[in-house]
Amino acid sequence: MTTMLSARTILTLLVPLLAGTQTPLHAQDAGAKPAQGAPAPATPPAGTKPAPVPNTAKPPIALPAGAVVPADYVIGPEDILTIVFWREKDLSSEVVVRPDGRISLPVLQDINAAGLTPEQLRESLTKTAERFVEDPNVTVVVKQINSRRVFITGMVARPGPYNITAPMTVVQLIAFSGGLLEYADAKNIVVMRNENAKDTSYKFNYKEVSEGKNLKQNIQLRPGDTVIVP
């Protein structure tokens, strides 16, 4: 009897003690480590900047390489142009100037280009595009010049058309074409030119010029000129 009373007394004393040593559930959670495999919350180091927000706007179109454009250049038939509308890829296009002097572009349709400088064409395209695009930004790149041609025919090594993107004289054109052939009549070369819808001819004596005489006959050529070497 005494033994049972002693055990009951001990149990009576231990229950309150055990209850007092238990940690509340919320206290356990506060100090607990995250479960293995669970992602820890991302805490950026002190002093670091937040990651930039990605830019979802359309990137501008890269400009292609262009040809060397003479100071007096105006657009002409067969020239190749690249029209770039920034952030408007659907309107941008590479075009060839037609024989009638016009170009065709998506949405804008036919636009006159011949006789204009690249800057004048840019202004014209900007004005036309304002009907379809808010605040259009246009760039005109001259990719290839085919309208500024001179021609040489007759007794030269390589007769044919030559593009001129810089000042060129009769002597320089003869050199570009490979020089005179053995039986060429160097004293009676003729330069044909159309001025104001009228054909004009200029005589050129290669032998005199090569000897440093009468140098003023070595005229600067213009687009459309034809040098005839008999």
Image (cartoon, rainbow, N blue to C red):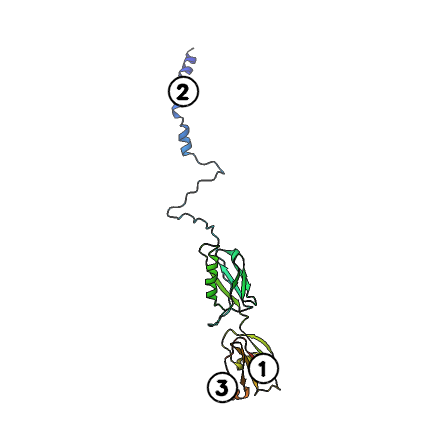
Q: Quadrant of residue 176?
A: bottom right
Kind of residue sitting beneath label 1 = Ile
Q: Earlier in the sequence, mark 1 or mark 3?
A: 3
Q: Position of residue 41 (x, y in %)?
A: 44, 40
Label 3 CA crowd tier, 10 Å (few <14, some 14–19, many 20+): some
Left/right placement of residue 226 relative to residue 124 reads right
- What residue is pinned by disc 3? 215
Of the pair 164 and 12, the residue shown nearer to us: 164
Q: Would residue 40 be found to the left or right of residue 96 on screen? A: left
Position of the N terminus by quadrant: top left
Name the residue carrying label 1.
Answer: 228
The picture places residue 134, in percent across and down from the top left corner, at: 45, 54
Residue tagged by mark 2?
A: 15
Say which of 19 and 208 sits in front.
208
Q: CA distance from mark 1 to mark 3?
A: 19 Å
Q: How far, Cα to Cα, is label 1 from label 2?
A: 124 Å
Corner quadrant of residue 31 = top left
Q: Residue at x 50, y 85 (%)?
A: 217
Q: Amino acid at mark 3?
A: Leu
* Label 1, residues with CA under 10 Å away: few <14, some 14-19, many ≥20: some
